Image (tube, rainbow, N blue to C red):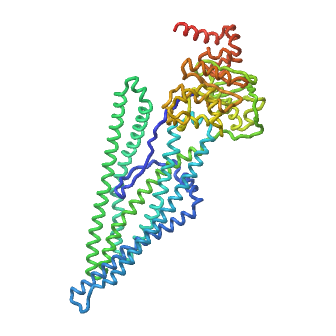
Amino acid sequence: MSEQRKSQSQGGGGAMGFGGGNMMMAGQKAKNFKGTFRRLIAYLKPQRNQLIAVFFAAIMSTIFMIAGPKIMGNAITELFEGAYSKFKGVPGAEINFDKIGQILLVLAGLYIISSLFSYIQQYIMSSVAQKTVYHLREDVNEKLARLPLKYYDSRPNGETLSRVTNDIDTIGSTLQQSVTQFITSIVTIVGIIIMMLTISPILTLIAIISLPLSIFVIRPILKRSQKHFANQQRTLGQLNGHIEEMYTGHQVVKAFGHEKKAVAQFDKVNEELYEAGRKAQFISGMIMPMMFFIGNLSYVLISVVGGILVTQRSISIGDIQAFITYSRQFTQPITQTANIANIIQSTVAAAERVFELLDEEEEIKEVTSASLKQAKGAVTFEHVDFGYGENLLIEDMNIEVQSGQTVAIVGPTGAGKTTLINLLMRFYELNGGTIKIDGLDTRSMSREDLRATFGIVLQDTWLFNGTIKDNLAYGKEGATDEEIFAAAKTARAHQFIRTLPEGYNTILNEEASNISQGQKQLLTIARAVLADPPIMILDEATSSVDTRTEVLIQQAMKRLMKGRTSFVIAHRLSTIRDADLILVMDQGKVIEQGTHHEMLASNGFYAELYNSQFSKQTAI
């Protein structure tokens, strides 16, 4: 089933908080948060010792950092009392700079130790995050290799790529940044509350009361901004998809003169994105000013009450300075925690998408009881039934191909020609019946052994980013240069390769657009020649080359197919006259079979197809 699929750009949900100047953004929610979260945590279990070290380092770093304002307050108190006593004229009163210097040295030491623990925490966590993502990518990559072809046929390429790249990157970024930040924020909140309580329970109560007030004020704003952020992500996905389509199909857009329509569509979606983004940013932008306003009210109240307590000698001026510092720091970890909660929600949603891929139904597990060492190439279809859904496309198909025969498969579009090849290579499982090679059921051998028996050249060429030599060597592991050159000569590709600036070392780009479509087809044929399989499959292999090149390829193919079993799917019936067996398919059934001359004599469906092509060519 040869289909071209459009890669779709997925606009994934994200989350940002209003801490540190960022705006809160609604994260994509997971369907099963608890189950997915537990499963994600399971990937961290092998690094539990490192995580314990991270947790310990985060606690130590935060504790030393939290102690700083209190010690700084002691230095300020010492300075103030010395200066005040001297101002009052107390005999022998003076500022004890030695003691202040000692306090500052202790403070500097605390900050250095805190930074050291912070470095250790980040260093270990980076290793934990990358190892976790590494194992997750490995699992996904192995899973992709085990998925049946129907999975790829039923989903856009962009959807799978988004899960493999974007979603896993989201998980890695969260583990790298947010986990340590979350630990630090929690420890900071607890530590600051303890330090504030040791200074003044009354002032601590004032500072804490501002929190529920802040939540009460910003909650309605968050709800309104979530709707606009959701619209922003939706329109962003639409814009990305439109840009990708217009970029990959720019030649078609220009050929049909649709530039103005494409630009108009872009402007429409871009305008929607602008409106959604403007509203989302404006509404969420109100959060920080309101947070600052409530914070400043709390700050003023703490300063007033603190000043009264200082005058009553209930608290030292240095402690007031330390408390004000703590109160200013208090909202930051709370904001970060709210931010991280949203990020974790979005990350779990990304993890859920990855786990959905890992839970996809795999190819039926192999029960290997036979092996093809050197296949002769005899192929038999016995009462084969198959359908992509509930309705059968192929019913009770029976075909017998002798070793070394060339079998041509013809028929109208959608007749089941490529489906027959997919079944032969076991890309899909049969609904009923059996397919045998040399008398062995293909289901009794491993897929690797089975597919090593075939060489295949498809209508849609596939070449990867690399040199021409590397692309040809893909057909045979450990191929020598002499074997590669010989295969290229057989496929009539050697001559055009030699004309390229770098010859066989010419690098093909990702789309292999730096060579023609016909040249790409020649390279895929040379790759199949190099594989030297006992059975060849040619699915419209010469459809993209000119007439002269087609004649050369046909000559090469005749030599290549000599002594091999070959299946050839062709629309141009003039190219298959010499086939040993021609199968005419229609609606999933073989309605005629025989040689070219036999079926022309029977004056059936094949004769009608052949004569219609011949009459068209004569008319031209």
Answer left or right for 275 relative to 137: left
Q: Residue at x 63, y 33 (%)?
A: 484
Residue at 63% x, 30% y is 487
The answer to whether 42 appears left or right of 16 in the picture is right
The answer to whether one can see residue 156 in this image is no
Of the pair 546 and 36, the residue shown nearer to us: 546
525 relative to 219 in the view: left or right: right
Question: 295 above or below 380?
Answer: below
Image quarter hosting the N terminus: top right
Q: Could you tell me residue 570's position as x and y percent?
A: 61, 20
Q: Residue 133: x, y in percent?
A: 54, 52
Q: Position of residue 534 (x, y in %)?
A: 71, 29
Q: Is residue 582 above or below residue 479?
A: above
Residue drawn at (33%, 64%) of the image = 210
Task: Please identify the residue farthest to the bottom as the structure is shown.
Answer: 91
Question: 419 or 454: nearer the eye?
Answer: 454
Place of residue 260 in the rendered image (x, y in percent of width and height, measured from the top left): 34, 27
Q: Nearer the viewer, residue 254 or 81?
A: 254
Is 402 located above or below residue 192 in the figure?
above
Residue appearing at x 66%, y 20% in the figure: 408
Residue 562 position by quadrant:
top right
Residue 462 visible in this rendered orientation of the protein: yes
Image quarter of residue 456: top right
How many numbered tags mark residues here? 0
